[in-house]
Amino acid sequence: MTESGDRGLPARKLVDIVFGVVVMGTVGTLIGLIMGSEFMPPAIGIGLVMGGVVGFLGGRRFLISILVGTVLGGALAWLLAGPERISYGAGAGAAMGGFLGVQVSMLLDMRAARKAEAAGASVEEVAQDARR
């Protein structure tokens, strides 16, 4: 227990952080594979740190979109180009998944704002309900 009396991070936030570290660490590994062995440690390190920060900030939808993009991109590259190109497809899929995840999140937030305006509720309340 800390001096302030709290019990540390809630379990949900800890799961988000671990999920972020795993997803972004994997993406960092894929980028390191493509760039070469001398870039592998910094790419993995940056991915781990970024994943921890995104998880801490609550970017679960963003991380899921990256995970789905990685899997689908790798699978598509495997089907079209063979197993030697899986890492390229997975890396490109992760980038596209992240881009699409940000766009979808923005659209969902705009929709929540419109609903809040129509219902007279605050934007934050409707946005939190939409994320649950």
Image (cartoon, grey):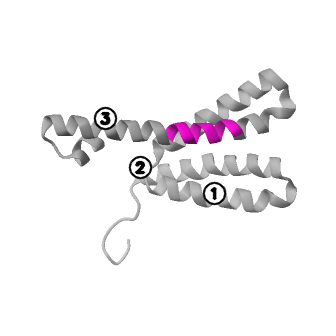
Give the number of the mark in front: 3 or 1. 3
Which SS class for mark 3?
helix
Secondary structure that dominates the magenta span:
helix
Q: Residue at x 80, y 22 (%)?
A: 80
The percent position of residue 70, horizontal first and vertical second, equals: 66, 36
- Residue bounds of the magenta highlight: 92-101
Question: Which badge, 3 or 2, comes first in the chain's sequence?
Answer: 2
Q: Earlier in the sequence, mark 2 or mark 1?
A: 2
Indicate the position of residue 110 as horizontal and vertical percent values.
33, 39
Residue placed at 53% from the left, 36% from the top? 100
* Up-down relation of residue 52 to residue 88 (above or below): below
Q: Residue at x 83, y 25 (%)?
A: 81
Q: Residues within 10 Å of mark 1 (few under 14, many from 20)?
A: many
- Mark 2 or 1: the one toward you: 1
CA–CA distance between discs 3 and 2? Answer: 26 Å
> Callout 3 environment at 10 Å: few (<14), some (14 to 19), or many (20+)?
some
In the displayed structure image, the side of residue 129 where residue 96 appears, left or right: right
Question: Would residue 102 appear left or right of 48 to someone viewing this image?
Answer: left
Residue at label 1? 48
**For residue 7, side relative to residue 87 (left or right):** left
* Image coords of residue 79 (percent x, y): 78, 21
The residue tagged 3 is: 111
Q: Quick check: marks 2 and 1 in contact, CB under 8 Å? A: no
- Which mark is nearer the camera, 3 or 2? 3
Q: Residue at x 31, y 75 (%)?
A: 4
Can I make out residue 2 in this image? yes
Q: Is residue 131 visible?
A: no
Under mark 1, the amino acid is Leu
Residue type, numbered disc 3: Arg
Q: Where in the figure is residue 22, as x and y percent of width and height?
A: 62, 48
Query: Label 2 belongs to which residue?
Result: 12
